[in-house]
Image: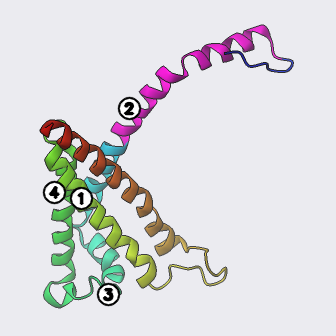
Amino acid sequence: MSIAIPEASSHTQRTVNFLLSHANEWSTRLEAAGAHVTRYGLVVVLLWIGGMKFTAYEADGISAFVSNSPLMSWAYQLLSTRQFSAMLGVTELLTAALIAVRPWSARLSAGGSALAVGMFLTTLTFLFSTPGVIEPTLGFPALSALPGQFLIKDVVLLGAALWTAGEALRAVARERA
């Protein structure tokens, strides 16, 4: 395949042709690298955020989200802010560990990914229940830096969790076949 590049040197033309001739090989490698970064990036995020849940700083930081959530506000009637945060931390650490074991158990990894999907779907509901998500001086759809922009990143984390779940479930199905 040759692409004509106006006023390009023959060296530039050869470089472009070389890159195009190896595009399939490189795209395969990039995709594999992206899969590993997606899975283990999700693991790192869950480990980091889960570990932080054991601090007063993080417990206080999530309290506005939880207390305003119709799905989760009941938890503060049963547990203190710190206890609930620690419970979330354990859940996030367990979720991370389950996703990380994919090389050894696709089934456990799929379970961890399913937990992550549920967790990110839940946190995305905070976009609708937490005061201050919309920047009032700009109106909808402008998100405030906190909490709006902080929460919207969970769309990408949800996508990563859905991908890891699908990949692990496909591996489980291959093991059964």
Q: Secondary structure at mark 1?
A: helix
- CA gap, disc 1 and disc 2: 22 Å
Name the residue at 25% across, 43% down. 170
The x, y position of residue 93, in whole percent, is 19, 57
Tell me which corner region of the image, top left, top right, bottom left or bottom right, holds residue 81: bottom left
Magenta residue check for 61 = no
Query: Which callout, 1 or 3, points to the residue nearer the camera?
Result: 1
Residue 155 drawn above or below residue 56? above
Q: Badge 1 is on which residue?
A: 114
- CA gap, disc 4 and disc 1: 12 Å
- CA gap, disc 3 and disc 2: 40 Å
- Amino acid type, residue under disc 4 in the picture: Leu
Q: Badge 2 is on which residue?
A: 32
- CA gap, disc 3 and disc 4: 25 Å
The range drawn in magenta is 8-37
Marking on residue 94: 4
Decide which of tag 1 and tag 2 comes sooner along the chain.
Answer: 2
Q: Secondary structure at mark 4?
A: helix
Total residue callouts:
4
Tell me which corner region of the image, top left, top right, bottom left or bottom right, holds residue 100: top left
Question: Residues at badges 1 and 2 in contact (C-beta under 8 Å)?
Answer: no
Q: Secondary structure at mark 2?
A: helix
The x, y position of residue 77, in whole percent, is 18, 91
Left or right: where 24 falls relative to 58: right
Marking on residue 97: none
Q: Badge 3 is on which residue?
A: 70
